[in-house]
Amino acid sequence: MSYRSVLEEVTVGRAGQWALKALADLRGVTPVRHPLGFVCLPLERDGGEGVCLHLWSDALTHAETTTSQIHCHSWDLVSHVLYGQVRNVHAVVRDAAEDATHRVFEVVSGSDGDRIRPTRRTVRHSTGLVEVFGTGQTYTLGAGRFHSSVIPEGGEAVTVALGRGRPGSHDLSLGPLDTGGHHVARKPLDADETALAVRLLRTRLTEEA
Protein backbone atom coordinates (compact mmCIF):
# COMPACT_ATOMS: atom_id res chain seq x y z
CA MET A 1 0.00 0.00 0.00
CA SER A 2 1.07 3.63 -0.37
CA TYR A 3 -0.16 7.04 0.73
CA ARG A 4 -1.49 7.74 -2.76
CA SER A 5 -3.30 4.41 -3.13
CA VAL A 6 -4.96 4.66 0.31
CA LEU A 7 -5.97 8.26 -0.34
CA GLU A 8 -7.61 7.09 -3.56
CA GLU A 9 -9.54 4.42 -1.65
CA VAL A 10 -10.75 7.06 0.79
CA THR A 11 -11.70 9.44 -2.03
CA VAL A 12 -13.82 6.89 -3.90
CA GLY A 13 -15.58 5.59 -0.78
CA ARG A 14 -13.76 2.29 -0.33
CA ALA A 15 -11.87 3.09 2.90
CA GLY A 16 -13.73 0.47 4.95
CA GLN A 17 -13.05 -2.31 2.46
CA TRP A 18 -9.41 -1.26 2.25
CA ALA A 19 -9.04 -1.29 6.04
CA LEU A 20 -10.51 -4.80 6.36
CA LYS A 21 -8.03 -6.06 3.76
CA ALA A 22 -5.17 -4.35 5.58
CA LEU A 23 -6.16 -6.05 8.84
CA ALA A 24 -5.95 -9.44 7.12
CA ASP A 25 -2.16 -9.12 6.83
CA LEU A 26 -0.45 -7.27 9.66
CA ARG A 27 2.97 -8.86 9.28
CA GLY A 28 5.57 -6.38 10.45
CA VAL A 29 2.97 -4.08 12.07
CA THR A 30 3.26 -3.50 15.82
CA PRO A 31 0.29 -1.69 17.41
CA VAL A 32 1.35 0.85 20.03
CA ARG A 33 -0.36 2.98 22.67
CA HIS A 34 -0.18 6.58 21.53
CA PRO A 35 0.21 9.30 24.21
CA LEU A 36 -2.90 11.02 22.82
CA GLY A 37 -5.10 8.16 24.00
CA PHE A 38 -5.57 5.87 21.03
CA VAL A 39 -4.00 2.68 19.72
CA CYS A 40 -2.01 3.26 16.54
CA LEU A 41 -1.40 0.65 13.86
CA PRO A 42 1.39 2.13 11.71
CA LEU A 43 0.70 0.52 8.35
CA GLU A 44 2.96 2.50 6.04
CA ARG A 45 5.85 4.93 6.35
CA ASP A 46 7.69 6.04 3.24
CA GLY A 47 9.84 9.13 3.59
CA GLY A 48 7.56 11.97 4.61
CA GLU A 49 4.33 10.05 3.99
CA GLY A 50 2.53 7.71 6.36
CA VAL A 51 -0.71 5.77 6.85
CA CYS A 52 -2.05 4.59 10.22
CA LEU A 53 -5.21 3.14 11.68
CA HIS A 54 -6.26 4.76 14.97
CA LEU A 55 -8.56 3.05 17.47
CA TRP A 56 -10.09 4.68 20.54
CA SER A 57 -11.70 2.17 22.90
CA ASP A 58 -12.09 1.84 26.65
CA ALA A 59 -11.57 -1.90 26.18
CA LEU A 60 -7.85 -1.17 25.76
CA THR A 61 -5.47 0.42 28.25
CA HIS A 62 -4.69 4.01 27.37
CA ALA A 63 -1.32 5.73 27.44
CA GLU A 64 -1.29 8.98 29.39
CA THR A 65 0.03 12.20 27.92
CA THR A 66 2.76 14.05 29.83
CA THR A 67 1.88 17.41 28.26
CA SER A 68 -1.71 17.89 27.04
CA GLN A 69 -4.07 16.80 24.28
CA ILE A 70 -3.49 20.07 22.39
CA HIS A 71 -0.90 19.59 19.68
CA CYS A 72 0.03 20.33 16.09
CA HIS A 73 1.66 18.19 13.44
CA SER A 74 4.68 18.62 11.20
CA TRP A 75 2.60 17.09 8.44
CA ASP A 76 -0.66 17.76 6.64
CA LEU A 77 -3.38 15.43 7.91
CA VAL A 78 -6.19 13.69 6.06
CA SER A 79 -8.38 11.79 8.53
CA HIS A 80 -11.29 9.57 7.53
CA VAL A 81 -13.71 8.30 10.18
CA LEU A 82 -14.33 4.59 9.66
CA TYR A 83 -16.48 4.15 12.77
CA GLY A 84 -17.87 6.33 15.53
CA GLN A 85 -17.57 10.06 16.04
CA VAL A 86 -14.56 12.37 16.31
CA ARG A 87 -14.60 16.01 17.35
CA ASN A 88 -11.77 18.05 15.85
CA VAL A 89 -11.36 20.87 18.36
CA HIS A 90 -9.25 23.75 17.06
CA ALA A 91 -7.21 25.70 19.59
CA VAL A 92 -6.54 29.42 19.28
CA VAL A 93 -3.00 29.89 20.60
CA ARG A 94 -1.41 33.27 21.30
CA ASP A 95 2.00 34.09 22.68
CA ALA A 96 2.04 35.30 26.28
CA ALA A 97 4.58 36.15 28.97
CA GLU A 98 3.40 37.10 32.47
CA ASP A 99 -0.09 35.65 31.93
CA ALA A 100 1.03 32.48 30.12
CA THR A 101 -0.71 29.25 31.05
CA HIS A 102 1.24 26.77 28.90
CA ARG A 103 4.64 26.17 27.38
CA VAL A 104 5.18 24.92 23.84
CA PHE A 105 7.08 21.64 23.63
CA GLU A 106 8.74 20.17 20.56
CA VAL A 107 8.09 16.46 20.11
CA VAL A 108 10.84 14.55 18.30
CA SER A 109 9.74 11.01 17.52
CA GLY A 110 12.09 8.11 16.94
CA SER A 111 12.17 4.34 17.07
CA ASP A 112 12.54 4.45 20.86
CA GLY A 113 9.62 6.82 21.45
CA ASP A 114 9.20 10.59 21.79
CA ARG A 115 11.67 13.12 23.12
CA ILE A 116 9.74 16.03 24.63
CA ARG A 117 11.76 19.24 24.55
CA PRO A 118 10.56 22.45 26.23
CA THR A 119 10.91 25.59 24.13
CA ARG A 120 11.17 29.18 25.33
CA ARG A 121 7.73 29.98 23.85
CA THR A 122 4.92 30.42 26.39
CA VAL A 123 1.29 30.88 25.40
CA ARG A 124 -2.37 31.07 26.33
CA HIS A 125 -5.06 29.22 24.40
CA SER A 126 -8.81 29.16 23.95
CA THR A 127 -11.22 26.86 22.14
CA GLY A 128 -11.85 27.76 18.52
CA LEU A 129 -13.86 25.98 15.86
CA VAL A 130 -15.30 22.62 16.93
CA GLU A 131 -15.97 20.24 14.04
CA VAL A 132 -17.88 16.97 14.49
CA PHE A 133 -17.30 14.11 12.07
CA GLY A 134 -19.08 10.77 11.90
CA THR A 135 -18.70 7.50 10.06
CA GLY A 136 -17.81 7.99 6.39
CA GLN A 137 -16.70 11.61 6.75
CA THR A 138 -13.26 13.00 6.02
CA TYR A 139 -11.52 16.07 7.36
CA THR A 140 -8.17 17.72 6.77
CA LEU A 141 -5.82 19.73 8.96
CA GLY A 142 -2.76 21.61 7.82
CA ALA A 143 0.62 21.27 9.48
CA GLY A 144 1.11 23.72 12.35
CA ARG A 145 -2.59 23.98 13.30
CA PHE A 146 -3.11 23.34 17.01
CA HIS A 147 -6.03 21.06 17.80
CA SER A 148 -7.20 18.08 19.83
CA SER A 149 -9.17 14.99 18.81
CA VAL A 150 -12.03 14.24 21.21
CA ILE A 151 -14.11 11.06 21.36
CA PRO A 152 -17.45 11.04 23.21
CA GLU A 153 -17.02 9.69 26.75
CA GLY A 154 -17.33 5.93 26.75
CA GLY A 155 -17.45 5.84 22.97
CA GLU A 156 -15.33 4.11 20.37
CA ALA A 157 -13.93 5.43 17.13
CA VAL A 158 -11.74 4.23 14.28
CA THR A 159 -9.99 6.45 11.77
CA VAL A 160 -7.47 6.08 8.99
CA ALA A 161 -4.93 8.88 9.28
CA LEU A 162 -2.81 9.89 6.31
CA GLY A 163 0.10 12.25 6.82
CA ARG A 164 2.34 14.07 4.36
CA GLY A 165 5.30 15.92 5.87
CA ARG A 166 5.72 19.63 5.31
CA PRO A 167 9.37 20.78 5.26
CA GLY A 168 10.25 23.20 8.04
CA SER A 169 7.32 22.19 10.27
CA HIS A 170 7.58 20.64 13.74
CA ASP A 171 5.48 18.41 15.96
CA LEU A 172 4.48 20.56 18.93
CA SER A 173 2.41 20.13 22.09
CA LEU A 174 1.19 22.48 24.81
CA GLY A 175 2.14 21.52 28.35
CA PRO A 176 2.63 22.83 31.87
CA LEU A 177 4.96 25.80 32.23
CA ASP A 178 7.36 24.05 34.61
CA THR A 179 7.63 20.64 32.89
CA GLY A 180 11.16 19.77 31.86
CA GLY A 181 12.47 17.78 28.96
CA HIS A 182 11.82 14.06 29.09
CA HIS A 183 11.38 10.90 27.05
CA VAL A 184 8.14 8.99 26.51
CA ALA A 185 8.29 5.40 25.27
CA ARG A 186 5.66 4.18 22.85
CA LYS A 187 4.51 0.97 24.53
CA PRO A 188 3.55 -1.86 22.16
CA LEU A 189 0.49 -3.99 22.78
CA ASP A 190 1.15 -7.54 23.86
CA ALA A 191 -0.18 -10.49 21.88
CA ASP A 192 -3.51 -10.66 23.72
CA GLU A 193 -4.09 -6.92 23.46
CA THR A 194 -3.18 -6.96 19.77
CA ALA A 195 -5.69 -9.75 19.13
CA LEU A 196 -8.36 -7.77 21.01
CA ALA A 197 -7.60 -4.58 19.07
CA VAL A 198 -7.77 -6.36 15.73
CA ARG A 199 -11.00 -8.10 16.75
CA LEU A 200 -12.54 -4.76 17.75
CA LEU A 201 -11.44 -3.18 14.48
CA ARG A 202 -12.84 -5.98 12.36
CA THR A 203 -16.11 -6.00 14.27
CA ARG A 204 -16.61 -2.24 14.00
CA LEU A 205 -15.65 -2.09 10.34
CA THR A 206 -17.86 -5.04 9.46
CA GLU A 207 -20.78 -3.30 11.18
CA GLU A 208 -20.29 -0.36 8.81
CA ALA A 209 -19.64 -2.41 5.67
Image (cartoon, helix red, strand yellow):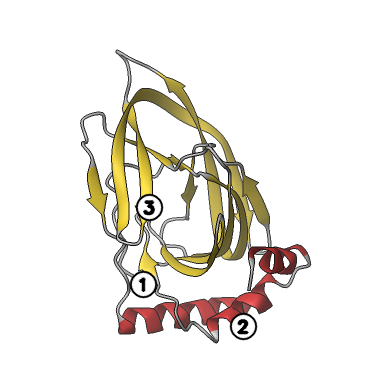
Q: Position of residue 23 (x, y in %)?
A: 54, 81
Labels 3 and 2: the sequence-earlier one: 2
Marks 1 and 2, Cα distance to the nearest angstrom? 23 Å
Picture quadrant of residue 81: bottom right
Name the residue: 30% across, 48% down: 115
Taking 180 as reference, is 122 left or right? right
The kind of residue tagged 2 is Lys
Q: Position of residue 83 (x, y in %)?
A: 58, 67
How many marks the image carries: the answer is 3
The kind of residue tagged 1 is Ala
Picture quadrant of residue 103: top left
Name the residue: 41% across, 67% down: 57
Query: Relative to residue 92, is residue 135 depicted above or below?
Result: below
* Residue annotated with mark 1: 59
Labels 1 and 3: the sequence-earlier one: 1
| Quadrant location of the C terminus in the rendered image | bottom right
Q: Where is residue 175 in the image (x, y as percent from the top left)?
A: 31, 36
Name the residue: 37% across, 59% down: 34
Residue 21: mark: 2
* Residue annotated with mark 3: 109
